[in-house]
Image (spheres, coloured by chain):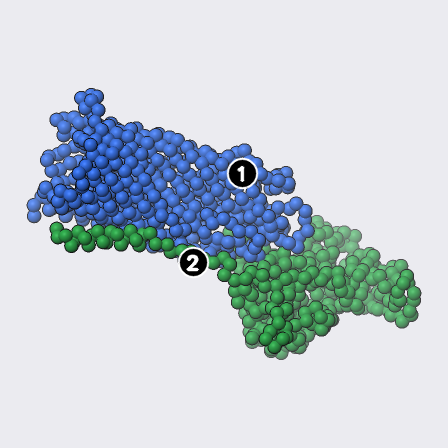
Amino acid sequence: MGFSKFLVLLLAIIAIFSVSVGASGFEISGVGTKAMGMGGAFRAIADDWTAAYYNPAGYAKIFDSQLGSSNGFLQYRYDIDPEYLWGGQYESGIYNDQVNYNNHEILSNPSGGFVTRLPFFGEIGTGLSIFQLFDQNNTWNLYDLPMAYNDGLFLPNDQYSVNLDVVAFQLTAAKEFMDDKLSLGLGLQLLRADLIYTNIYFRDNPYYDPTTNNPIAVRPFDKITQWNKNDGNGYGFGLNLGVLYDVNEKLRIGLNTRMPFDITIEGRAALEFYMPEIPYMDVIDAPFIEGNKIVDSADFEVELQLPTSFAFGLAYQLNDKFLVSFDAEYTMWSKYEGFNFLYTNHSGLRGTADTVALNNEFFTSDVSNPIEWENSGKLALGLLYDYNEYFTIIGGGSADQSPARLNSLLTPQFIDTGDKYTFSGGFIWHYRQYDLGFVTSYTTYPDLTTSDLVDSNSDGVFDNFNGFYTAESFETVFSFIYRF
Amino acid sequence: MKLYKIVSLIALSVLLLVIGCTDRGVNYDKNSYELKQGTSFIVGGSHAFTPQLEFQISNKFQQLPMNAYLPKAAFAIEDGGDYQPVPTLFLLPPQDGDDDFYFNHGLLKLADELISTGEIQPMNILCISNDKIFGGYFYAGSSPAAGSYDSLIGDELIRWAEEGGFFPTAIRTKAKRGIGGFGMGAYGAFRAAMLHPDKFSSVSGVSGPMDFDGADGASGFMTLFDDVLNEQGITGLNLPNTFSYHDTWHLSRLFISGGFAFSAQDTLFNYTDTIVQKFTGQVKEYYLLSSDTLDPISFPSSNAISFPGDAVPPNAFQNDVNFAYRFHLPFDNVGAPVTNVWNRWLDNNLPTLFAANPNVFDEVNIWIANSSESTFGNYNEQTDSWVSILKAADVPVSEFNLIGYDGHPANRDQYVYDYLREMLIFHSESFGN
């Protein structure tokens, strides 16, 4: 067996058996058809404008000018069969014992950029690109108020949802050194984060007291249903550093690190409380029995903690038609601890909901959605075959280690049931100065059952969502590159 | 690479694209059933029960507050042109509970939901009130002062509800009639079922005073009186001068209600048929006289508690009576039993009533729920003891137990909603088709 075949075999074995090493979280699956089609194993190739994402050093080796764009269309197909009962036994209103789907959405992930060479410091490859670094988007309808609690109110359909986008506007510069064997690249990123986050919080009724038996706080009124919708945005900065080194004519090594800095997201939140209706208690202006929806609004602030990632890549040109590549990435997801929403400037509370201290304290409380994640890895293997001068076939796969692998704090907004495998393939059609790409990918997730409700931060609100989870996702990417 | 392989790869990619874009829809259906299956009807204040409540303390109008669930099926005309007949369930609230007790724990919506989903059949549900002044009267009828509940629940209430037109489509048979309750209401339900064996085919109870002296004959209420004295801070003091019924002293009120029910100073009706004109109506004269058959030597006089008779019924010439209601506590000021008073309580103990008629449950379905957390009044122990007695007599008992969850123990009324769901299902199944 020649070295080339040995290397291909070795990389394939590593990729297939690499689940214990494996980046997930809410990092995007990738940018561009070529990179995506090769399972994301693109850091040592980095030969088109998408190098801005994978390895900025690649811009040093792009000798024409490029204008490119890609758009990925994703569908997350998640199922939850909830087992969400207080104490494992008592009805909560969650749609238990039935399979629930996340709302049908075809999500898009557009990106674009251009590359050109400028006569500075000799000559450098430069470019400006826009792409998403992080993305999380799904919406669930999983709950209805128990009839005896209140059958006159209905929650909105986006009960549990997240729409998080972190978009990077990156200015990239790269230059060759050491007789062009070494390339260094730097990307300066302006980050824009947009967050819409909704969640149901089952809050302990503040009038609950096991010793007094207050009838307004017994089952099913022991938990008050709160639905929050937070809509805001923020700006931050990030760095994207890359290295490319040509070991020889066939083998190239790539290194890359992305360092997004934390972003403070600010916006406005709607806080809605769906109150119990206890019709036979004749108390005037008593928000905990009258069955009304109490609506508050407030400014909010939340810190979005973004992880640094480190990646290593190899690319080997087997012959004039075959190229094989391998990437390993490690992402510091332990930094991400979820969302801790801080509310100020409340407005909207009326009557005793506002004037009674206990009520006001309840309705204006901050909420948090903690997550406990671990650092995680990702391995990717890619193959490229130049069929002819017009047609290139690409394929690949990746194994992603779940950052949520060591705990059960799983929520509908962040479905991560375990280590995932992605298989992708597609083609690129070369026509004159244009490259038109098409890639589809499929990601399979392991099934997962979580069985215990956990209040990890002891704020009286359970932080996870129990049930039987299954998941898969599909993504199709179209792209074009215009070379000039 | 052959062209067909390329075409195959492209076709596979397109297939994935199509699959990945398909809409799976939503499989939940919030409105898959009609939510409204019945209505509630507050009867309170509308009907006086005479003579059952003629002399009940603090009930000048002799009225029994009631709240009812009427299923709409009872008002739906069937093919033959008749209304659909439905069974009837009588629910007794616990100590301090009123006729809204079960409705305030979700009865209306729970019944709607369970009927909608087919888990229970449509049924009338009548909820009466317990006395809220003194904590209740155990639904026992040994004293006119406390109300003649034995006659009321087992006879007059049923007659009024079924024959008086309130539940016009009620099926007037034992098989289609059930009774249940929580706490003191559980006692009342079993008492009524045993004293009126021809009336109820199903009886249910949740954690109640169902064996006053416990499994060993020395527990139950017998080990509780120290807590009562501590509740009021009067241990060792002279009871008549200090014993009170403050609404936060629930254990004290428990014994007051039992005192009225089981060891009231004997009261007698003295009826004269003189018709007198009073205002615009004709009024009969009633007199409530007191006597006491308890041997005054065998219990300390300090054990008798009085409450002023300011609630003598309006038809009586109360000014002439000037009656103060008196009752005797079964334990003295250091918690020791007063034998002949305590014996009156034991005469009303469920195991005693059962022993007098061991076949009383031969055609009755029984459901008993309990919680180890239901420690008020030692109810959990008393309930377990009652279950054991029934089982020892080969009486089938369906049991149900809840303990609650972290920070929310299933004590007293915390889980009425969850118990009630199971209780309704039990009675529905007992009613049969």
Residue B48's quadrant in the figure? Answer: bottom right
Q: Residue furthest front?
A: A432
x and y, in percent, of residue A46 in the image: 21, 36
Q: Quadrant of residue A30?
A: top left
Residue at the image position 65 percent from the left and 76 percent from the top: B173
Horizontal relation, residue A133 to residue A357: left or right: left
Q: What is the display colour for chain A?
A: blue
For chain B, what colour was chosen? green
Q: Amino acid at mark 1?
A: Ser
In the displayed structure, A150 sits above or below A132; it is below
Q: Which mark is residue B27?
A: 2
| Mark 1, residue position | A297
Viewer-proximal residue, A109 or A94? A109
Q: Nearer the viewer, residue A455 or B241?
A: A455
Q: Secondary structure at mark 2?
A: loop
Side of B300 where B89 appears, left or right: left
Query: Residue at point 92% right, 67% down?
Result: B276
